[in-house]
Image (tube, rainbow, N blue to C red):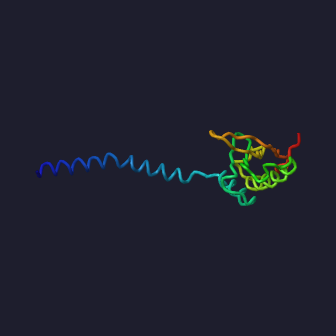
Amino acid sequence: MKKDAAMSTNFVTALLILCAPMVANVAGTAAAQTNVAQPAIKIENIRVLVVQNLGAADEAVEALLKGNIFTVLRVETPASKATHQEFNTEATSIAGVVGRAIYGKAEYEEIHTIRVQFLRRSGSPVKSSILDTVDFRKSPKGDFELHAT
């Protein structure tokens, strides 16, 4: 019995000695990962700013970044029966919020378009219909201007 206990103790000690470098390496990697620079403002934070600015329901605003285009989706808006000019007015407000949030942030430097799409979702399975799309292009000054086609 004493022999088994001694062997178990030796085994555990050997295991700790062998694994200590790996544990230190993992701990060092975790510490290094937490020191990696995070984006100054995340896409979700920008989406929340838009929600707050519009006074919209949380689920009525979605945001995504694909390539050089930052897209805000307005889902089932009260303006769903709006004119193009009314969509432009709301889109201008949204683009202003997004533009101010990303201005001067290196991780968003390559964005050249802020796109606002107004959607209606219905059916089962759910299908989206685009009611209107309004684009804002980056000017040489770095602000985003309504793009008219």
> Which residue reaches farthest front?
123
Nearer-the-camera pick, 16 or 104: 104
Name which residue lies at 86% across and 44% down: 147
Q: Position of residue 35 (x, y in %)?
A: 55, 53
Q: In this view, does 140 lie to the left or right of 4?
A: right
Q: Quarter of the image holding residue 70?
A: top right
Q: Is residue 1 left or right of residue 138?
A: left
- 69 over 27 or under it: above or below: above
Name which residue lies at 39% across and 49% down: 23
Q: Where is residue 113 in the image (x, y as percent from the top left)?
A: 78, 44
> Which residue reaches farthest left?
1
Name which residue lies at 69% across and 48% down: 63
Q: Is residue 11 left or right of residue 92?
A: left
Q: Position of residue 37 (x, y in %)?
A: 61, 52
Q: Is residue 70 visible?
A: no
Q: Can residue 33 be seen in this view?
A: yes
The number of numbered badges drawn on the structure is 0
Nearer-the-camera pick, 92 or 78: 78
Q: Where is residue 149 in the image (x, y as percent from the top left)?
A: 88, 39
Nearer-the-camera pick, 42 or 125: 125
